[in-house]
Image (spheres, grey):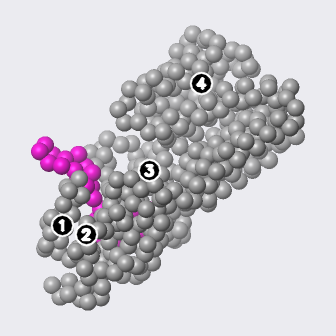
Amino acid sequence: MAAARGLKTLQVVALILFVRILSVLFVQTWYVPDEYWQSLEVAHKQVFGYGALTWEWQKGIRSYLYPSLFAALYAVLKFTGLDSPEAVVLVPRLFQAVISTAADYSFYKWTGGRKWALFLILTPSFWFYTSGRTLLQTMETCLVAIALSVYPFKDGALARYEKENNKWVWLACISTFLRPTSAPIWLVLALYNINTTNQGKLKLLAGTYLPIGFIPHKEFRFVLPLLPILLYLAQNVIVPWSRKAKAWKLYLVATVLLLGNAVPAIYLGQTHQKGTVQVMPLLREAIGSNNRSSILFMMPCHSTPLYSHLHLNITTRYLHCDPPSPGETYESEAFYNNPQRWWRQEYSARQTPSLIVMFDVLRGRVENLLQGYKLIYEVPHTQYPEGEVGEKVLVFQKNVQMKQTDEAI
């Protein structure tokens, strides 16, 4: 399993593409708000003229480069009249899957076309979980993998580079422009290029982890761009070992790696935090053709996608988490401190919403606000509720009698 003899380029690409498209179709859960609110929601507003922008976009501190890729896809769907809600949801993820395929193939070529490298890039559960998501970190990881495949390493096994190749510089610039947190990777590589030393990849890892360690806000996805480097180091160990190992040991290692990643991939892709995504088509169904409907999301801010998954020009209201003015609190915090007072301030002079979406943990605190509403959907979300995030997502619809009263007012 050392070298990919017998595998043609088209076969390798087809295999990678199959796995990446499978991840798009299989992974139907929520991960983080940025997957929608920092990419698809922005693109949807650009093309279709309605949508929601978070405070970063209103202040102009975000780059439109990544959302513009999806805006171009939306524009094609709009022009061709193929902009069904299903297409608007699926096409951007398929596009990202194609980019991830190019990155995986670049990694495979970077390693010299080794089968173990191909196996290692296709098996990680977290990459399967994120490679088809419209996250900046996903695109950043792709750019890092592609750039590393053309980077002019000069030592050891990578001495096959006979002349300087500066394509990586452009990819590094784009990667850093999208996410400034990419800078440590390329700073270390730039220094490496100036003064080539052995074990450059280990130093690259250290030079990346240490700066990221000083960032106050940390998430696991922030180190996702290091995946190609980690996998390169892994295959650099496993390939020499595999040449001497017995066949049963090779199959044992492959089986353990495959099953060890399959279990979390299945759970994360199908079960954990699925309610806030799966509730969106149910909301479209509840609204039907009534464009006068309105939805209130009584949930922590950005708990669900919005117009990029509704694809309906209706009124929505969700709790904001914009930086508050001095002496004030976050709106979401003010809501959870006193839901009744927030409701009175919000709806004392206008119609109450047609639909209310919330986690089940909130229901007991707002029963009096739900008078005149009926529960129409109850969607499982997670087996590990935490804080204001519950086990289920609940959807309440206003009764007909209450609607008529509001319209009379």
Looking at numbered disc 3 in the image, what kind of residue is underneath it?
A: Val
Kindly identify which numbered label has been placed on residue 340. 1
Question: In 3D space, how far apart are the residues under numbered discs 3 and 1 (Cα atoms)?
Answer: 28 Å
Quadrant containing the N terminus in the rendered view? top right
Query: 10 Å neighbourhood of mark 2: few (<14), some, or many (≥20)?
Result: few
Label 3 vs 4, first from the N-terminus: 3
Q: Position of residue 254 (x, y in %)?
A: 76, 40
**Residue located at (35% from left, 68% from top):** 357
Q: Nearer the viewer, mark 1 or mark 4?
A: 1
**Could you say which is closer to the camera, residue 122 or residue 300?**
300
Q: Which span is picked out in magenta? A: 306-332
In the image, what residue type sits under mark 2?
A: Val
Residue 102: name its quadrant: top right
- The x and y percentages for residue 9 are 79, 42
Residue 78's spot in the image, x, y percent?
A: 48, 66
- Tell me what residue is drawn at x 64 percent, y 21 percent: 152
State how far apart marks 3 and 4 are (Cα): 34 Å
Q: Is residue 147 rendered to the left or right of residue 83?
A: right
Contact (CB < 8 A) between labels 1 and 2?
A: yes
Question: What residue did someone put label 2 on?
Answer: 366
Badge number at residue 32: 3
The residue closer to the viewer here, 329 or 363, is 363
The numbered disc on residue 166 is 4
**First in residue order: circle 1 vs circle 4:** 4
Q: Secondary structure at mark 3?
A: loop
Q: Position of residue 29 (x, y in %)?
A: 52, 58
